[in-house]
Image: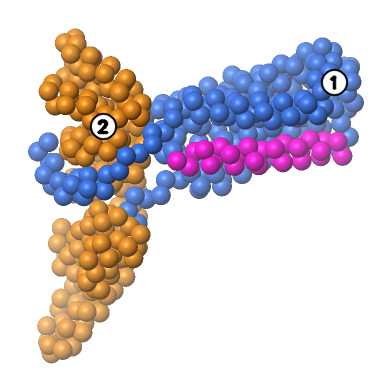
Amino acid sequence: MADAPNHQSLIHALGADLAPVRRLRPPLWRALGWTLLLTAMAALLVWHYGLTPMLTRWRGAPDLAWAGVGAVLTALVAGWVAFSLGVPGRPVSRAWLVLPPALLWIGASGVGCLRSWVAPDTVVATMAGARGCLEFILAFSLPLSAVLVVWLRRAYPLRPVLTAAMIGVASAAGSASLLEICHEFDAAATDLAVHALAVGLVIGVNALCGGRLLRPRRPVGGM
Amino acid sequence: MSAILTNALVIGVDGGLASYQDAVRAVDDSSLSDNQQADLRRAAWMAAAQTGDRVAYERVLGESVGLVRAVARRQGVPADLLDDVVQETLITIHRVRHTYDPARSYHAWLSAIASRRAIDSLRQSGRRGRRELHEPLAVEQHADERQANDAAEQSERAAALRAAIATLPPGQREAVEQLGLHEHTLAEASALTGRSTGALKVNLHRALKALRNRLHGEH
């Protein structure tokens, strides 16, 4: 407290500038909003494509179901972690929580390549088909990433690049989850490679651009 | 304790009341350490500040100064930069006070912000140090020009001042130009630049300090 008088004039100036603020909702609440958004988009796709093809594929090849569950969990956990990183004082180590569902997603997808039969109601992806997957993931990731960036603009991420990378993981995994509903191709190596490329692109672009968008502006224009 | 209870009355309905009451109950608990009680008290003040309580806000900022200095020292910030880190942190707190959740530790929230500001300050001072390596030579040369007549000397001083102002970071340069050179009032400068009066004051203060250092070699 002995040092406080040196800063008293600034404290008074800030006090004079004080206005009531709307408190940022806790990360869990905002993650719930993220979950509802993904659910609404999934409901629209199910309404359009129906659930039967997906369930038939899953019954025939359970690894596809596990990959889908892993993708959904990755999307939800990464979203929650991104919101957590937007609040000063929350542990950065939470970012590691994305790892287990991501391993399930990646691992189960990889197992699909080792199967010697093609899952029912699907075909092996041609290059054109795989390109469709790439376009789907990129097309859905863009608005999902934008929504997360907008939701995080009011927050204050002290690690903007890591936060943006989490946004990338969340939106890429979210897109992959949605793709599962209307995915006509089995987990062949080409298809998986294209998925990996799409997910990597989404995460990389988010880390690059999202990090800048989320970077806290200097409180005072200089220094 | 009475000050805390007084603050309970000014906390609005914006979600702060329940956590504040919890805090008051906890403060009554003698099993808590002094640090924990202080943290709860500051949490309650910050919750009140979020609803617009200026008294609580100035109290919590006043008590934050020592905490920020401690965090900055731990990060290795040298003594001459501590005040800058404190001011940057106080202004950051002001900008992001809506991100504080009164149900959680104020100390953890503040420390995270102060730590980031301390790291930024260390990086910037490192960069500035590299940029200004040759400046002392330039200042010495100006100091030796004693033989010039008054008009020429004044002109040179003005040129040196302009050059020094030009090297200031944008925010500081803006404050000097608006408040010092154009002699605008704080309110006018604030309206012209879109910056708060507090930010302008801080920038002017820093700019003057930097100019003194550059023109007279003060430390």
Q: Point out residue B114 in the picture as x, y percentages from the top left corner.
A: 29, 38
Residue closest to the eye, B115 or A80: A80
Q: B24 or A130: nearer the eye?
A: B24
Residue B23 falls in which quadrant of the image? top left
Q: Is residue B49 visible?
A: yes
Q: Percent x, y for residue B41?
A: 21, 25
Q: Which mark is residue B48?
A: 2
**Drawn side of residue A193 relative to residue A91, left or right:** right
What is the secondary structure assignment of the residue under circle 2? helix
Q: Within 10 Å of the Cα at label 2, are there few (<14), some (14-19), or many (20+) other Cα atoms?
A: many
State whether discs 1 and 2 lie on one chain: no
Magenta-tinted stretch: A128-154
- The question of residue A28 being in magenta is answered with no
Residue A24, by quadrant, is top left
Given the image, on which type of amino acid does mark 2 rest? Ala
The numbered mark 1 sits on a residue in which chain?
A
Which chain wears blue? A
Closer-to-camera residue (B35/A92)? B35
- Disc 1 versus disc 2: distance between alpha carbons? 55 Å
Quadrant where the C terminus of chain A is found in the figure: bottom left
- Tell me which residue sits at (49%, 25%) in the image: A29
Q: Secondary structure at mark 1?
A: helix
